[in-house]
Image: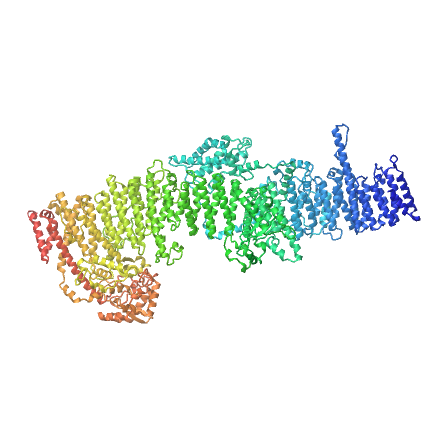
Amino acid sequence: MEDLLLNVVKEATGSKSSHLKQKAQEAHDLLVSQNNLLRNPSHELRSVCFIPLKLALESKKSKLVSLALTGLNKIIRDERFQTGTEPEDDSLWLPAQLLLATSSMLAHCEDTQVHILRVVLNLACTASWALNGRLVMLLLSRCGEAYELGTQPIRASAQAAASQTLTAFCTFLDEECQEILQQQQKHKNSGSSAEMVYNKTTAVACFNEAIPVMQYICSKLEENKMLPKSNDSTIFLLECLLTLANTLPHTVHSNIHFTTFLWQRFCPALLALLGSPGDSSGQGLTNNQAKIVYSIGIQVVRLVGRERPLRPVLEALFHRILLLPSPARRLEPLRAARELLRSPGRLADLLLLSGPSHRHAGDDMAIIRLIMDSIEESSQCNDHSVVLASVECVGALLGSLEALCRGEGLNQEAADLANSRYPLLEHADYTGPLTYQSLARLPKPYRDVVANLRYQSDSSDSSGIEGNMREEGEESDCSGATEGPEEEISHSDDSIMDDDSFLTNQQLQKLYKLPKSLNLGRAGLDECNTDIERHNARHFVKTLQNILLPNLLSLRSSIQVDEVLQEFASKCCQHNSAQSYEISTIMNADGIYLATYSALLLDLKLIQAGHYEEIKKEVTVPTTEVQFVEEIHGSGILVYVSATWLCELYQNVLAKSLLLCAGYEPKNRQQPALINLLTDVGGLSPSQLLTDWQKLQKVQATPETSPEVDAGVKLSRRVLTCCWSSVVSVLGTPLREKPLLGGTSALSRLVARRTRQKYRQKIRDDIITASLEGLHTAASLSNTLKLQTRSSSILALLSATSCKNNYSAKLLASHALSLDVLLSKGLELGCYSPACWPHVFSACVAVASLEHSLFSKTGSSQLLMVAQNTQNNIVTSTTKPGNQDKLSFNNSDEETCVDVYSFLHSSSYSYEQSNFSNETTIADIVEKSGANNAQGQGLLRGVYAAKVCCALSQKADELFHAAALRLSLPGLCSFMTELCKASHTQLFTKYEEASNISKKWWKKDLEIQQKPPPTLLLHRIGEVTLKCIKSGRPLIHIMKLWSIVGPHFMQAACHKDRVVSKKAVTCIHDAVTALLNEQAELPHFHFNEALIKPFENLLCLELCDLDVQDQIVACLCEFVEANRTEICSGWRPLFGTLRVANAKNNSTAILDVFRIFLSTDNTLVFANAALDYILCLLSHIKNSHYEDVTGDASLPATPSSLNKKPIGFFDKDIEFPTNLLTIDLCIESLKLLQNCSEILSMMYNMPKCPNFNLSHRVNIDTDPQLVDPIMKDSEIVSFSQIDNDQVDYEILHTKLDFKECEKEKITLSELDTQSGVLKVYYILIDGLSSSIILSSPKNQPFVIETLFKLMRDLMTNPGVNFGFCCINHILLPMVQNWLRQNAKVQKPDVEIWQNFKHCCGLASELVVDYLYNIHTSKKSDNPAATLALKQLLLILIECVAQPHENVARLGTSCLRHIILNLGKILAENQWTILVTALHRACYISLCPLYQLSLAFKENSDSFYGDLATVKVAARKDSNVAENERLYELAQQVFLMPFQRNCGKCPGKNCDCEKSIVIDDRSYVFLLYPFDCSTLLNPDMYTIRVPFRNLVVGILAHQMLIQTISSALLQNLKHVTPILNILQINSCSLRGILPKVNAEHVNMLLKCLEISNIKAKEFDMRPGLKFLTQKVGNLCKSANLYTQANTSEVVQIIVLIELCLDGIERYNIEPKNMKEILAKEDGADVEGNNFGFLDEFLRKLHYKWERLCESYVNLTINIPEETTEELTEEGPEPQVFKLAEFKQQYETDNISTLSTDSESYLEKEALPNVKDEDKIMEESHMKTLSKSSSLDQSPSDTTIKKKIENGYSTDDETNELAAKRYEVAYEKYKVELNSIKYDRNTLLQMRESTISSDNIILSCTRPGDLIKSSSCQLWTEDGKINGNRRILVGTSPKLDPFMPATIPPPQPVPPEIQQQRALSICKDAEAYKTTKIETMEACLELLSSLSSAKLSPLASILKQGAVMLVGTQDDKIKKTAELLLQRMNISYVDHDNY
């Protein structure tokens, strides 16, 4: 310094400088004079030295100035000027002196000014200098002036100097404060009792000095605001303020003056400074100035953030900063907010308020809410920079919260405060209002300031909270008080995974059918006895409490506990089924098992809720009774427990704790295994992880905590609970905006845009990256802070962004990190909040598809393998060099395929990331890849993408692995439910919708259409299910799990993609196999049934195709082979499945399954599944004919045949063996059924037979079936009102016998045991019998054979009564149904009739055997036996009435069999039934004949009917062979043997018949009542008698009569009949007659009588006989002489026998005989045999006289000229055979037949109208010459066709026809009357007309009915019978003028007349012959009697014999005379009486 002063002296030359020189010298001298002892104070030295320097500066000489500046610096540095204490006067302090010395500064040049300011700066930097507020203000003033006027360098220096000064000042004050505090501490420690008034307040009083400085700056700012150009100094002042705020220590908040100044002066100043936003007057701050103000605000937070009283001020400030500007102008405020939020310390300042709260006190979260509101509002802004800033703010906040959680930013004091305020984490939850509420709470001054600002601000800009409406669909927490985060969830944020996609599958038609569960019924819930159920439940509770629980509480492992529970449930059911009550409790082990768990869990919940404690009674019960019952019944498992039982259990648990009674101590730290097990089942621990897993974790790691960390976590939770929705909203907004979406679209734009747009795009990408990073942090925070329940919204956003991209080989780094978060945090978050699962699963799918796209690409058909070297990342390509050029056009990184897993080898398969090698954390890989560098564009490529992908896919694997092993039951259920939902969406929504929209049409990938994605979640479901099963979880977990995944597998198995359906079936298969191996099912459990149920549902509902069916069948067969003993209850659905399975390809495997089941020796399992087994076998027996269908091409295609693949010509060979196989399967099934029945009969005798499962499918207790005694269509319509006496058939009704059976307890329910074994047996027989009808004809014989074998076996065991039950209610009704079913079919298969006959025959034989059986066992009064006999007879009667020859013959032969075999053993009442049945059979078989006869009068020649109109219709429904046989039968029935050939032809076959062509038409007689024209619908009253019915009926009848005759004529004692006359074949019915009484014989005689009467009635109607001759193609007139004679002769023989027997038995004298004969018939018939004898005697008398009389009459009336007629006729009539006659009934439907009673009709030609005027004549009778049948003119065809199409019944006419007749009549009236045609004319006319055969030819289908030839009715005098037009059309029109009269006679053509005459004549001849034969036979019979036998009959026979003596025939005359003589020999003496 001395040297410098000397230099100044040197330089100071000139007069002006003398003063300077002098002062410099003085100063120099003074300095030199200083020595150690005598020193001047430093301020004196300074003042002396500063004077020359000041003068030097002012001299402005450059040399001097520079010396002065150096001097200034030296003074500051030199210690001499610093030592010692400063004086009181602050003007002597160094800063004041310096300011004085440099007062001329502003006049200097720039450099000098800068240097001077540097000196000030240097001064401020020195350690020791004295400062006070005044000096600071002076310094600031000086700097401010320099700043205002100076250039840029000066400003910088001024700013630096001012700032440093302020910093030094604050430091100085702080040190002072600290010093005082230390002094205080010392005094405290020394314990001096001096009254130290030092305390904290006095210490911080030091800071009072800063107040004026701040005041000064504020005033300056206010002044500046008034000045026009004050901007420059404003920045300077603001910077000063900022420095002050920055450097003041935190302790200043304790200074009450300071805080008062802050809120009264300082903050309002800031607010005023900020002005209103958008101030256009130019008064507002610039951007830079505002930035500084914002920073000051942040520092204010640091200083007084924790002061409660100052909170309103701060709120006002932040309100102005952040909320008043419009969002577009918030960029800088947001950046400031980011700075504030970035610091954990500042956050803590805002969160921890000091002191007690009072009315105006702020709330700790208000500012944070205010900030968040601003951020949230800004995030909706259109300016990308603002959006980015708002996202970054949230990111900063979340980052700070993470830091807080680590304990950063908190000191000990703050931590203690926080921990004391919030003792538990949950207490920290924020419960106030969720948006900032402005103004209401501000103190008045602020309210005015803010209000003013708000009014000033431009309305367009103002967007306070009021404008800030939240987007809908956001999660919004309720603002009321809530107790914990759980209740604040609202799941609306799930909207990202929209539910519509989930519902679209409903369009898939198949899935409509799908059961949503496994369709396991809830059995028996209604059919229970409540008292018994309740009693049982109470007993159960006692057992549970006293026996089971003490044992359970002592066990150590959960698995043991579960096993004991299962055994307990099984034993309960065992015990229950052993009870032999009338009504037992309904239960199965599954129900008991679940109920036990539910009861214990309820108990535990009640204990935890304090329900059982005496003190607090008001506890809400966690589960209601209804919920309790529903939880068990709705568990998706087969549960048999009644609701009553469960309710009783529930009430018992509520009343008294089972666990506490059993000794459970809730307060013990060590909980028993049972409690852990219940905790897992109920999900009672908050983390939803298994208790065992939690224990493991505790052992592994107990993280060290500190109070700071605890406090940080609590504060973070408080902030997040308050701001959660805003955070989600801000982070989600950029991700939701379409144009901002990241991913490929962003990539393509990045490349495509020009530079101008690149910046904007970069910002967009930055926003997305920032959002994703924020979300990552939020996700981990929600985990740390136990806010997992809210995390779903975060995960939703993450998955929405990163999972919906179509990945290529490139991957955005931010997406990789998002996926990482989703997969690593997913499990922890998901256990708390199930809403997270969908997002986690979509991440899994995304990773899988990324993996697929990365590694499935095989370049240009060549796979590139890249070997990965972890050390130096060298990529080596293993491709051949030759292929390289092929790939050159591709991006190399697109095509790289990486050896993906090499770098993971080091890391073990574990969940913790810490075990990974360093490189494998995703963040590290991303870091290394350089994706975030400038050129990286945020993309991972090639190898890095592959590495990330591998790490992610490993995490996905671990996620599922961990879920299966760690989640508690409710957690696992929610996990699987969501997984199944996600999988369902994946499988059944249309994948293309999203992806193909963007694609151009030419780019569409055709193969991808309708294919499911390559990465199916279905695999994952299968995997998790298997892991759960194998992880050793308790059975209840598996049950609940299966009820979730089972239905999903079922749905997936219906997927149209074979890959999916195959996988689904495989999943079920694997799960079932694993369970069968892992878990042995105990007795009475039915869980295995639920396991196999999906297969049954799939097949029964026909939901899957044949491939899947085959796969399912294969699975079932595999189960059976591998685990036959473990299947247990699974057999039921297994057979249910096989029942509907397509057995074609799997028959051998299926048979194996059947055999294995029968070989199981477990009766309980057999009893459970026997019914299903039987039904399954039966279905295979019934359905085994499906395969035959395809072989027969003529059959219509059945659905099953349509499914088959098209048959090529090879397939015929292939079909053959399968047919063999199907029969095989049927036969094998039949054998197995036999075995099954053997087992059942064995079990019937078991002492303790298990109960059979009948709970489903079969209801047997309805009324059993009986044979229907009423035959359809068997009533006779009588046209005249005469009724013959009918026999009463009432005895044949079955109801009474059935009631008798019930009385005798011969019913199924009475015979059965408690086990229900007979019901099952009954179902077996029932099913087998019904399968006879349904199985194929080929298999029917085998089924029939089996059925009858089983039915025979029933006699021995279970016994004859059960056998009768089956015969009466199954077998016989089935035979009747089959008969009726066959009768309905147009043409049943010959084979089927054959099988029916076999069956019917066997049934008859079976009944006979059974009757014999009970006869031998002396129980012959069994009502069931009578019922069986009666029902069998009813069926045989129905057979007899069938119009099929074979069946009718069957009926008669079976009846004969019964009479033969049972005759000797039947009881009397049974004989009565038998003979009544025979009578009914005889009567019914004659019905057609009787019906036809009723239409004709006796001796009438008319063949048109006398009492009704008779027509004949032809139907084309037969074939030639059938007709040939029918005509043969007609000959047999209607002609006597000698009439059956013409007599001229040798041998049996007559060639004369050959001229008749037999065609395929059948004929029906139609009988119309005469008054039918008055009826609206004559069709209703038309009686049809088919010719076939007539013939077959008479045939059957004649056979019956033969049987009856044989029965009656056997074993005659008195008479020896001459059988060859009677033409009755002898049969061995010996010994029957003695067994029957007279009443029965009388009934049999009535049968003969009815036969005789009906035959005679027919024989007396020549017209009818002629008609029959023509229709039946007979050569002679039809007659029934043989029948009449046979029945008559037999009657006479039997009557003679009976009379002789009676006379002998009762010793009747001749005089008595006369009395008897004199009585009127029926006068006093007594019911005894003697009474019947009277009747027999009278009958014999009457019969004999009638016979003789008719013979005598015959001989008188024989016409003489018979022989001539015959010769005259010659061969001519042979032409008029059936053909012509038939023609008459077949001419086209314009002709009608009618009747005539008297005249011999002439046949008129019938007119046929064509074109209305041209009339062609057509004859009714035509030959069948071919020419006539083919020469039809086309025009005529059309008319006929029209008519034909109009109506199609077989007897129709129509109006058109009638009209034509009228026309015809008008034109031909004369001709018709006058001309008599001779034969030749007729023939010529016939050739000129049209043959009506064409109408038959033009008919298309064999089934069509041919039109009846309904001839219009001609009257005899030629008039058209117009008033009787019969129009049998669809709607008949009635003629109003029609009187109801008997019709006039009909004209008949001459040749028909001629034929009829000839026929009648020949018939008379035949009649005569038979009469003579009969008479001779009778006489011969009587002659053969001995005189002793003849004499008693004299009075009966005498009169007739006398008549015979008068006949012409010599032979008969002689015989009669002889007879009289023989009779009279013994009677001579008495003759006179």
Q: Judge left or right: residue 1063 versus residue 1192.
A: right
What colouring does the structure picture have?
A: rainbow
Q: Residue most toward the right?
A: 15
How many discs mark residues in the rendered view? 0
Is any part of residue 801 visible from this angle? no
Residue 1101, position in %: x, y?
42, 49
Taking depth in this image into account, of 724 and 1283 the one nearest to the observer is 724
Residue 547, position in %: x, y?
45, 31
- The image shows residue 1281, relative to residue 1920, as above or below, that is above
For the N terminus, give its image quadrant. Answer: top right
Is any part of residue 1112 visible from this angle? yes
Residue 2022, position in %: x, y?
8, 50
Taking depth in this image into account, of 40 and 1271 the one nearest to the observer is 40
Residue 1651, position in %: x, y?
21, 53
Taking depth in this image into account, of 936 and 767 the one nearest to the observer is 936
Taking depth in this image into account, of 170 and 1566 the one nearest to the observer is 170
Q: Residue most toward the front?
A: 881
